[in-house]
Amino acid sequence: MSFNKIKKTFLPFCILTSIIFINSCEQPLEEEEFPYEMKLVIRGILESNQLIDEIYIGRTLPVAVPFNEDFANLKDAVGAVVSDGVFYPLRHTGDGIYTTDSLVASMGKTYSLVVQYQDKSVFAETYIPVPGSILSYGVTNVVEDGETKSVMEGTISPAGNESYTANWVFLNFNGTISREGESFVQVKRSSAGQQIKVRSEAIPQSVLNNTNGNLGIRLYVYDGAFYNYFQTQGSAQIPDAIFGQPGTNVRWNVEGKGIGLFIGRTDTIKAAQ
C-alpha cells in the first residue's frame, strides 16, 4: 500500500478515533506560551517474531525549556501500524509507549506507521531485513591514533538493501550475553554482488583476558535507511532510546511534522571460533 493511499485511508480513521479520545485529550496551557514549532518524535524498532509494542510517541520541547518528561511524552496520539492493508490501532501503555496489541513482525515484510496528534501528522515505512550470509568473523587488530586495538570483525555477503553494523559480545558458557559493546563505530551499506566487512568498537582488555566465557560478534542488520541516519546523527550510541531535539542535518526516516526512526532490525550472534 502506497503512502498516499495510507494517508487517504488514515484520515477517516483519525476522525473516528478522535471522537473516542476527545474527552481525554490533554491541552496543556503551557504549550501556547512556547514560541516554537512543535514536532512529533517517533522511536520504533521492529524485530522479527516480536510483537510491535514499543513505539514511542512524544514531542519536541523548546531548546531553552528544561526537559519535562510528562510534557514530552504523549498519551493521546492517534495512530496505527499498517500491514498488508490492515490497520492495527496503537494503544498507549504508559510513558509515551504504544502497542499494537497483536501485530507480530515478520522477516521480509514491510510495515507503515501513521500517527496524528492535534494538527501534526507523520508517516514512516520500514521492512524487516533478511540477513545476508556471514562468510567469516573473528578478532582482528586495527590501529587507531597510533594505538593497536582488538576488535571483532565480520565479512558478509548481503541479501538485499540492508545496513550492517557490529558489536563485540562476551557470552557465558550457556550462550547468554554477559557483556556487550556500547557503541557502533561504523555502519556499512549493502552493495549488490559485493561482500562487506564491518567491525565493532575496541574490545576491553579485561574482556579479552576473561576465560569464563567466549568472545563473539553480534551483527545488527537494519533497514537500509539506517545508514543515512547513522552518517548524519553525530553519535554512535545504539539507537534503542532515540528522542530529543531535532538535529539540523539528521536524516530520519519519519516524514511529515516529526522526527525519529521507525526501523526494522534483525540480529545474529556468533561465538568466536
Image (spheres, rainbow, N blue to C red):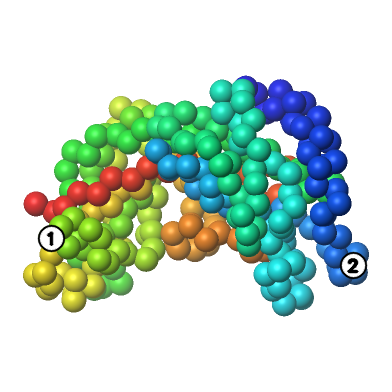
Estimate the x, y position of residue 206 in percent, counting from the top left: 18, 76
Above or below: residue 46 compared with residue 183: above
The three-letter code of the residue at mark 1 reads: Phe
Residue on which the image places disc 2: 29
Rendering coords of residue 55 (x, y %): 58, 50
Q: Residue at x 79, y 58 (%)?
A: 38
Instruction: Report if the CB atoms under discs 2 and 1 are less than 8 Å apart.
Output: no
Asked if 178 appears above or below 108 in the picture, the reply is: below
Q: Residues within 10 Å of mark 1 (few under 14, many from 20)?
A: few
Q: Is residue 219 above or below residue 17?
A: below
Q: Amino acid at mark 2?
A: Leu
Q: Is residue 83 above or below residue 141?
A: above
Residue at 12% in and 60% down: 173
Q: Where does the N terminus fall, quadrant-wise? A: top right
Q: CA distance from mark 2 to mark 1?
A: 56 Å
Disc 1 on helix, strand or loop?
loop
Numbered label attached to residue 173? 1
Compared across the picture, whether 43 is left or right of 166 comes to right
Q: Quadrant of residue 180?
A: bottom left
Residue 47, percent from left and from top: 43, 42
Badge number at residue 244: none
Looking at the rendering, which quadrant does residue 4 occupy? top right
Q: Nearer the viewer, residue 65 or 144?
A: 65
In this image, 247 relative to 182: left or right? Answer: right
Horizontal side of residue 185 vs 143, given as left or right: right
Q: Earlier in the sequence, mark 2 or mark 1?
A: 2
| Residue drawn at x 54%, y 51% as measured from the top left | 54
Do we see residue 136 in this rendering?
yes
